Amino acid sequence: MSSSTPNNDTAQQRRERLLLAQAERQRARELEIARQEAEAAKEEEERRLAEERRVEEEKRIKEEQRLAEEKRAAAERALAEEMRLEEERKAELRRFEEELALEEQRVAEERRKELAKLKAREDKRAADAAEDAEEEREQNAAYVKLVEENRKEREKAAKELERQQKRAPAAKPRPVDVIIPSRPSGSRSKVFKSKAVISDDSDVMDVDKEQVETTRGVKRKRPVKMIAKGMNFSGSLTFDLAVSVGPRF
């Protein structure tokens, strides 16, 4: 009995050791499987995370691209708006310059016309002054000539009176209306008709100051003394005398 126990124990031990070895191998296999599964899960998780990171990276890149595109489009719109505003400013400046040039031309044309009017008025004034001076010179010459003729007529009348007085008593002179006519038609000066009476004690007829009105509205008054041609007149005498321009006595 004692000789078979060790053998049995040995067999039992061998079986136990075998079972234990089998269990260890099984456990090792299970551990390996678990390890492999863990590694596979880890790899899968890493792949999942990598895929998520890839997707997130793609989203980030796309978002950055979208933002960059929006920024570029906004910059292009801003540039286009700035160019449009610049064109509008240039067009407005051109319109302003054109209007300013037209206004300057209008003002220059008005000034030219005004200067032309002023020159025309000055030329007319100078021509009128020259014409007035020439007319006054001619009328003064005519007046001097008439005075000289009247002086001669006075001397002649005095001689005639002296001759008549020698032959008969002198008659008392009658007042005589003397008409001084207006200037002929077309004259620049206008003389109004006036009457004067020859006194009974003088053969010099005093004519009131004549009122003279020129075409420019200037009024003058000049005293004039007329010489009667004789004392014994029964009618009116007409003197062709420009009293408006006669010199002062």
Image: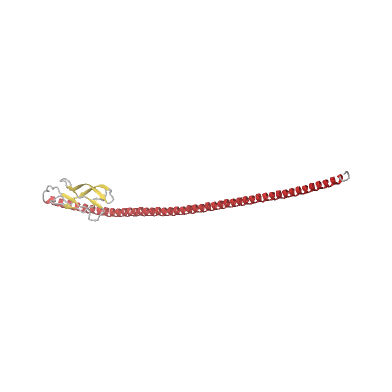
Task: Name the residue furthest front.
Answer: 1
Closer-to-camera residue (120/181): 120
Residue under the image location 70 percent in, 49 percent down: 37
Closer-to-camera residue (24/48): 24
* Residue 225 rendering spot, x and y as whole percentages: 22, 48
Residue under the image location 70 percent in, 50 percent down: 40
Task: Name the residue furthest top.
Answer: 2
Q: Is residue 124 left or right of residue 166?
A: right
Closer-to-camera residue (35/197): 35
Closer-to-camera residue (15/119): 15
Residue 203 in sight: no
**Number of marks drawn:** 0
* Residue 84 rendering spot, x and y as whole percentages: 49, 53
* Residue 154 rendering spot, x and y as whole percentages: 19, 51
* Residue 211 rendering spot, x and y as whole percentages: 24, 47
The quadrant of the rendering that contains the N terminus is: top right
Q: Is residue 229 left or right of residue 120?
A: left
Does 131 appear above or below 1?
below
Task: Name the residue furthest left.
Answer: 168
Residue 66 in sight: yes
